Every structure is written in C-alpha cells, then in structure tokens.
Amino acid sequence: MTQGRLSAKSLGLTKHRHLLGVEDLDASALVELHEQIDRFVEVLSRPNPKVPALTGKTVATMFYEDSTRTRVSFETAARRLSADVMGFAVSASSVKKGESLRDTAATLGAMRIDALVVRHGAAGAPVQLARWVEEGVFDAAIVNAGDGWHQHPTQALTDTYTLARSWLVGDGADPSSCFSGLRFVFAGDLRHSRVLRSSAVACAMLGAQCVLVGPVSLHPSGIDLWLPSGCSGDGSLRLSDDLDTELVNADVVYLLRVQSERQNEALFPSGAELHQRYGLTEARLSRLKPTTAIMHPGPMNRGVEISSKAADHPNSLIVKQVANGVASRMAVLYRLLGGEE
Ligand code: NCD
C-alpha cells in the first residue's frame, strides 16, 4: 500500500498521514490492510505476542466518550507493537476544568506524541484535529476512533477483515471484490450509527449489496452520497423498512444498537417494539440460511436489536470482531507510523 492512501487527501490534508474516515481508504487499501492484519494475527498467536515495530513511538488515546473495546484494543495494539501509550481519560483531566479540544491536543502534542487516537461525541472532531496538525498547532497522525454519528473507520476494518476471512469468502475470490454477490442486511438504529456509515460503506467497496433496514423514522438521509466516487464493482447501498423480506437469502445480518446517548426523540415506541419489528428475534434467527453470519459491533442490548440466542449462535462473528480489533488497530498504527517489518 502506498503510504499516501491513509492520508486525508479528500480533505486536502497533505502534510500528514491520518485515518479520519473510511473514504481515506479504497478497496485496494482495505485489501493491503487485511494482509497486514493477517501478519499481526499470527504475531498475536505467539507465546510472546509482541514485535518491536514501533519502539520509540508514542501513541496517545483521547476518549471523550465511554468505550470499552475500542479504547482497550487501541492501547493493546500500540503495546503489542512496542509503542509507548499515553492514556488520557477525559473524565479525570483538565477538560473538566473547561480546557478546549485544541488546547488539550496541543498539550498532548507538546509531550511529543506520534499518533493521537480520538473518540469524540461531535462529528468532525478528528477532522478538526487534523486541520490543526496541518496548521502546525501540534504534530501527530490523527486516528478517528469514532466521532458522533459520522465515522468509525477501524470498526469497518475489523468488520471487513472478519468477514473476508469467514466461511462466506472462498480462497479463490478476488480480495478487492470478495463480497461480490453477497447480500448484507444492516438493521437497527441506522440514523445515529457511525458504524453503519463506515462498515456498510467498506463492505460495499468490496462488492457487497447492502440493505439498511429500520423504521422510516430512523432512516438516514443522503445515502447516495456515502459511497466514495470511483468506488468500483457492484457494491451498493439501499434503504428498506421490511426486515422479514430483506432477511430472505441474507448472507450477513449486522445489528446496530439504539444510540440512546445521541438522541432523545421518540423515534420508535419502545425497545420491545423495536425487537419485534426490527430485531433479530429467535423466530427470525430460525428462518435464516444455515450459512448466514451474524455481526454486531458491541456493546449489545440483548432483547432489543438482538436476541441472546442470535448473539450466542455458532454463526455469530461477534467475538471474532472484537478479537480481530487488536490486529486491525495494529495494522493501522503500523502503517501510519511507518513501522518497518
Ligand atoms: C460502537 C461505537 O461506539 O460506535 N461500538 C464500538 O466502537 N465497538 C457501536 C455502539 O456503541 O453501538
């Protein structure tokens, strides 16, 4: 992969390498990252699961929202690459005393960091940080670990990798269109989901036909603009509000949590109602093809978007998504920070 592919070219940010959104990648960048993830999965299976690739580099994590798996997997990934980790808990920081995002980032930057992994409730916060890097306020590669409803590109990477290495994709498949001919259903809170905006787009970039299913009140607008221009292959995105019809012949069912922290409108009657109409209930589970894969980025609300039986089903890739999260984030940090093999 050329190093430039991970830079935010679309934003005209040319001085530094960042991963701000899935549009910073394309099918060939995804494939090359998948191959890199393969190598790190092998590293993680060793008795000593560590390589010296990023010795001397410092990765700072700055999480303005609660997170378990994303934060832990980034910090574990950095340590497995022998980088130093500067964990920054917003709840125990000067942010509580009113410090701005710019000043906080500049403070961390002054301590010489190489990468800043940021999760923020506001869409666009990582882009703004990248602009400040461009202006010389501080210096670091910015990695978006989830911003508002906007993007969660490393989730897309772990999701596409997990599927590309699953039973759904044969050995002979062309890696850059490995999901061609497969039908993916994404169901739940479509409107407030940054995972959807990254993972469904990445799956479509690799050829998947993606149907986004949820109540019309939770349909996002402008999905025609989600696929980057020049996105090749037969991948597509379309909306539906009829889960039972869409599940017929689905190859992947990807459930999305109701993002109650990001909305307080009454967009659907109750969790129980959402489960009945748009959840992967036990009854719907029993009607899936025997090969259908079940996915969820976590944290799950069992009994709302997904039944316990579906979450714990043998075809569930949910634990694999988390496990592959570490090697996926290793691949991103390694590429951005220029590690040598
Ligand atoms: C997701 C997130 O925070 O966007 N979780 C994650 O990163 N694994 C999805 C969610 O919170 O529902």
Image: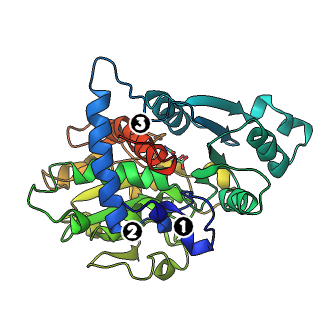
The N terminus sits in image quarter? bottom left
Q: Secondary structure at mark 2?
A: loop
The numbered mark at residue 26 is 2
Q: Nearer the viewer, mark 1 or mark 3?
A: 3
Residue of label 1? 218
**Of 207 and 338, the residue lying toward us:** 338
Q: Position of residue 244 (x, y in %)?
A: 29, 65
Q: What residue is shown at x 32% (from left), y 29% (from top)?
A: 44
Q: What residue is shown at x 49% (from left), y 44% (from top)?
A: 333
Residue of label 3? 326
**Of 61 and 278, the residue lying toward us:** 61
Residue type beneath disc 3 = Val
Q: Position of residue 341 (x, y in %)?
A: 35, 40
Measure how far apart labels 3 and 2 are at the Cα level. Answer: 21 Å
Q: Residue furthest left?
A: 172
Q: What residue is shown at x 40% (from left), y 62% (from top)?
A: 2
Measure how far apart labels 2 and 1 are at the Cα level. Answer: 28 Å
Q: What residue is shown at x 65% (from left), y 49% (from top)?
A: 140
Direction from residue 298 to residue 96 in the image, left or right: right
Measure how far apart labels 1 and 3 are at the Cα level. Answer: 31 Å
Q: If you read the primary sequence from the N terminus, does the residue marked by circle 2 or circle 1 appear first?
A: 2
Q: If you read the primary sequence from the N terminus, does the residue marked by circle 1 or circle 3 appear first?
A: 1
Residue type beneath disc 2 = Asp
Q: Position of residue 175 (x, y in %)?
A: 21, 62
